[in-house]
Image (cartoon, rainbow, N blue to C red):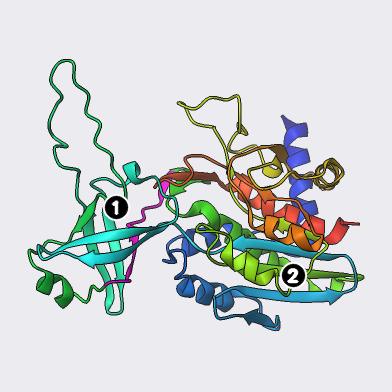
Amino acid sequence: MTKRIGIGILALLISVSSAGAQSKAWDILREIVLVPGVSGHEGPVSTFIQGRLPAGLKAEHDGMANVWFTIGSGRPHILFVAHSDELGWTIDRITPEGRVRVKPGGGILPQTIEARPVLIHTSRGDVAGIVSPRPGYDERPTEGETQETTFTAESFDIYLGVATEAEVRALGVAEGDTITAKKTITDFAPGLMATRAVDDRAGCAALLDAALRLRPETIKGRTITFAWDVQEETGLFGASELAKTLKPDYVFAIDTFVSTDSPLESKRFGFLPVGKGAVVRAVDSSNVTPKPEILKVLAIAKRRMIPIQSGNSRGGNDGSVFLASGAIDIPLSWPGSYAHSLIEKIDRRDLEALTNLILAIISDWK
């Protein structure tokens, strides 16, 4: 036991001394996860990020609300990118009966939000509502029948406690307003929580933490760019815009590893345990990471005593759009359970291992 504690303390000292400060990624995540930013409407998140960047860093932004900064010079050019958008909905129309109909803003699992509270983000402030249960939700099928009513974003409406379109509009609600699930952070234990939008606010927090701990004067013989892009959930559109001007040699996309670490899922694919460290994705739906680069990441993590895992996952990543210009895409992650639901689970140790890994790569990558 004494030996294990001693090794843990040594790893912490190495991490702190090499990065300049202890990680604040967990605290940042608990703030940024609550900032609304449905895909295509990321302005509040971009403002949060720009307000938290260290003084003296020259951040850039574009009309899409992508945010980035670049330090250093020379090659290689290494890009780290996380997406700032989240899953949600936009208002499509308001019915004469005072109900709100929606369009999806990304692939949230609709069955997870039936009869759940939501917030409509209007120009006058947030308005609370409830996703109405499907018709017949309280009816039991008769013997030999099954109840198979599809619940999709196009089929549900939101109840605001009023009965007419005029009353809805009097609340300040209008077509085009965004809607998010009402977020609650559930702490299972110290350093283990679940909430909506961990994907990819954890990646945003990891990059912000790394930016705060980074010492720009130590960056020699390489160019480093940190970027927080938009509209990943609806088609990698923000990253595609950045790829028109940023031409990195290596891109490390920071996003969820969709882990099957839950009681009901098969462990044959995508199983990396929550709490066992950061992740380098070997294969996902958009990219196959070259084996030499995987081994380089694993070697850096081992040398810095950073817990790390590798595996294959579903889903794509923003780095894939940079492949056409010659970049090598090496996605980094944390293992996350219950992706695209209201209870995305994350472990503090994994997030802090990820931000330590980002700083180690900046220092050691050759």
**Quadrant where the C terminus is found in the figure:** bottom right
In the image, residue 184 lies in the stretch drawn in magenta: yes
Sooner in the amino-acid sequence: mark 1 or mark 2: 1
Residue 24 visible within the image? no
What residue does disc 1 label?
A: 154
Within the image, what quadrant is residue 166 found in? Answer: bottom left
- Mark 1, other Cα within 10 Å: few <14 / some 14–19 / many ≥20: few
The residue positioned 13% from the left and 34% from the top of the image is 138
The residue positioned 78% from the left and 71% from the top of the image is 215
Q: Secondary structure at mark 1?
A: loop
**Quadrant where the N terminus is found in the figure:** top right
Residue 53, percent from left and from top: 63, 75
What residue does disc 2 label?
A: 225
Residue 99, percent from left and from top: 16, 61
For residue 21, side relative to residue 362 (left or right): left
The residue positioned 15% from the left and 77% from the top of the image is 170
Residue type at mark 1 is Glu
Q: Which residues are drawn in magenta?
A: 175-187
In the image, residue 334 lies in the stretch drawn in magenta: no
Q: Quick check: 139 above or below 286?
A: above
Q: Quick check: 162 above or below 2?
A: below
